Image (cartoon, rainbow, N blue to C red):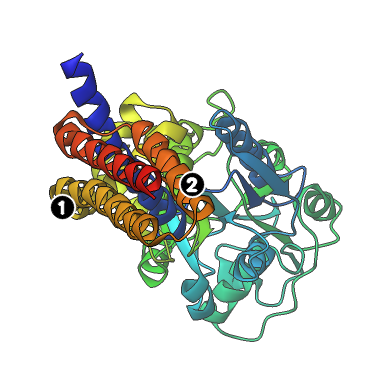
Amino acid sequence: MESFARMKEALKLYVPLALFALVVLFITMRLVAPPPPKSITFAAGGADGQYYALATEYKNRLSVHGIDVEVLETAGTVENYSLLAAGEADVALLQGGLAGEAERETTLSLGGVLAEPFWIFVPAVSEVVDFGDLDQARIAAGAAGSGTRALTTNLQADWGGAWRDPVALSGTAAVSALLAGEVDAAVFAASVDAGYIRALLQDPRVRLVPVRRAQGLSMRYPALAPVTLFEGVVDLDQNRPSTDKSLIAAIAQLGVRKDLHPAIQAVLLEAAEPIHGRGSILTPAATYPDPVKVDLPLSAEASRFYRNGPTFLRRYFSFEWANFLERAWVFLIPLITLMIPLFQVAPPVYRWRIRRKIYVWYNNLHDLERRGIEAKSDETRNQVLHEIRQLQMEVGGVDVPVSYNDELYHLRSHINFVEALIARQAVQA
């Protein structure tokens, strides 16, 4: 019984402190380190394009962690940047080589994820040998707002000279125009896995123009990289291409708003490895994601992820639990530092509270004794006796720690003494 009483006393003392600590931790985590959102918006591209298909893969992988992803159909990279800056999208696939100062102010990169060569196709009979030869040509170069159009414009400016305005055709529409002779060339910033690129690479009616100064261009643009389409890699039987082709590739990157929760960034990076690490006929497996070939600032979370991989807790717990524990751990040490003096001061405060309650009863008893002695009538005296008995019942129903029983029983005996004193005075009167 004594051990039970001691345990009960300890619970009364420390449970309020523990509850106080939990409340402080909860409030601090909500205000200082809020939980990650349950839904995000992903700006992709056209519904029939590769960006949209990749965004859908991210949607499927993040849904496993309870995160809902809304995929937005957009015109391409230029619109994606606008949506990120306006806060209407949280994540986007962005073609490399297009970021300016304004984009770097609002957007962070989680790394390069995909090589998108700048494909230059001309009729097989054309005498064009370099991109600069197309300065007066009719070039199908994507719709306004697309990454292909923006990259084409940048490269035209680098080559210099007076260029004709590009024709706003993209994808299969640009291919059809090229084959019909409606344009002199068609350019695309697209993955080698895009269906229309595969078809053009095997079509004898057109020819791929290499980029001779791809290495030089890559030095001018951080998110452009030289790649080589090796002889025969598309079709060994037909030996397509017939020679190695040097190309310049825009490295598409995974861009996020600067204020996107780090936990969401981490889970996006986890998803990026299986989605983009498969390799292609242009890049070996495990080339992407890559933290180097980007033209946006790399986020702090991405830098940590590339150095160390998933966090220790994430390796052993689900996304939700790992995030909760990581957030809680940040505040655990300062919380313990705060609680140590509170636990030290708790026993004296608790003792003061118990004794204060006893002292208040003594004050009440003293007041009742004075009123009883000074009573001029039996009615007043009986009222005082009634209040004394109520005080006795109140004190008798109080549960105090064993260590305070001595003081409590002294109080009860004093109440009995005062009651007897007032009652005796009433008989004598």
The residue carrying pointer 1 sits among few (fewer than 14), some (14 to 19) or many (20 or more) residues within 10 Å by Cα, namely few
- Tell me the residue that label 1 is attached to: 345
Tell me residue 276's x, y (percent).
48, 37
Q: Is residue 231 above or below residue 135?
A: above
Which residue reaches farthest top? 1
Tell me residue 192's x, y (percent).
58, 41
Residue 283 appearing in the image: no
Which residue reaches farthest front? 428
- Tell me the residue that label 2 is attached to: 382
Q: Amino acid at mark 2?
A: Asn
Residue in the picture at 25% in, 46% down: 354
Residue in the picture at 51% in, 57% down: 255
Between 426 and 33, the residue placed more toward the observer is 426
The secondary structure type at the circle numbered 2 is: helix
327 relative to 61 in the view: left or right: left
Residue 269 sits in quarter? top left
Q: Amino acid at mark 1?
A: Val
The secondary structure type at the circle numbered 1 is: helix
Q: How many marks?
A: 2
Q: Nearer the viewer, mark 1 or mark 2?
A: 2
Tell me residue 312's x, y (percent).
26, 34
Residue 28 sits in quarter? bottom left
Residue 259 appearing in the image: yes
